[in-house]
Image (spheres, rainbow, N blue to C red):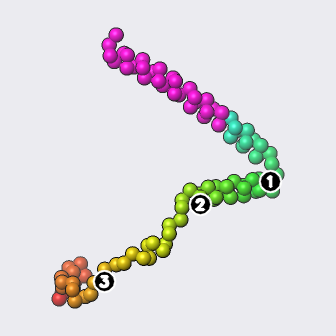
């Protein structure tokens, strides 16, 4: 057997080993989402709104907790160098059409 055939067989075995759990998980997830969609469709409009509010609140909390807030006090404490106009060289800016 050539090395290429051995590598191909090894790749096939690895694909089977790792794809089977993934396909099972995706199939189960699809089945649960489909059942959830059928149940949601049969709810009254008021119940659908309540479910939507609960899901949106859960998503909002997940988004807020995922990104920590930046401390603005540390940004304000940084000092910036003060540059006076006298220390800058006078260079004409051709894009503005100004001349010194």
State the extent of the magenta-drawn residues as a range: 1-30
Residue marked by disc 2: 64
Does the image show residue 87?
A: yes
Q: Earlier in the sequence, mark 2 or mark 1?
A: 1
The image quadrant that residue 98 belongs to is: bottom left
Relative placement, left or right, of 55 versus 63 is right
Q: Kindly identify which numbered label has been placed on residue 68.
A: none
Q: Position of residue 85 (x, y in %)?
A: 25, 88
Kind of element beneath mark 2: helix
Residue placed under numbered mark 3 in the picture: 82
Q: Is residue 82 left or right of residue 67?
A: left
Helix, strand or loop at label 3? It is loop
Residue 6 within the magenta-colored segment of the rendering: yes
Labels 3 and 1: the sequence-earlier one: 1
Query: For mark 1, what is the residue?
Result: 47
Q: Give coordinates of residue 12: x percent, y percent.
A: 45, 21
Task: Decide if residue 45 is in sight here.
Answer: no
């Amino acid at each position: 057997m050539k090395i290429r055939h051995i590598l191909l067989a090894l790749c096939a075995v690895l694909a089977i080993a790792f794809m089977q759990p993934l396909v099972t998980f995706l199939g189960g997830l699809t089945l649960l989402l489909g059942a959830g969609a059928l149940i949601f469709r049969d709810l009254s409009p008021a119940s659908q709104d309540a479910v939507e509010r609960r899901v949106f609140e859960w998503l909002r909390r997940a988004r807020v907790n995922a990104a920590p807030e930046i401390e603005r006090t540390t940004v304000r404490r940084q000092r910036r160098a003060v540059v006076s106009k006298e220390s800058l060289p006078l260079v004409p800016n051709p894009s503005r059409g100004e001349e010194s």
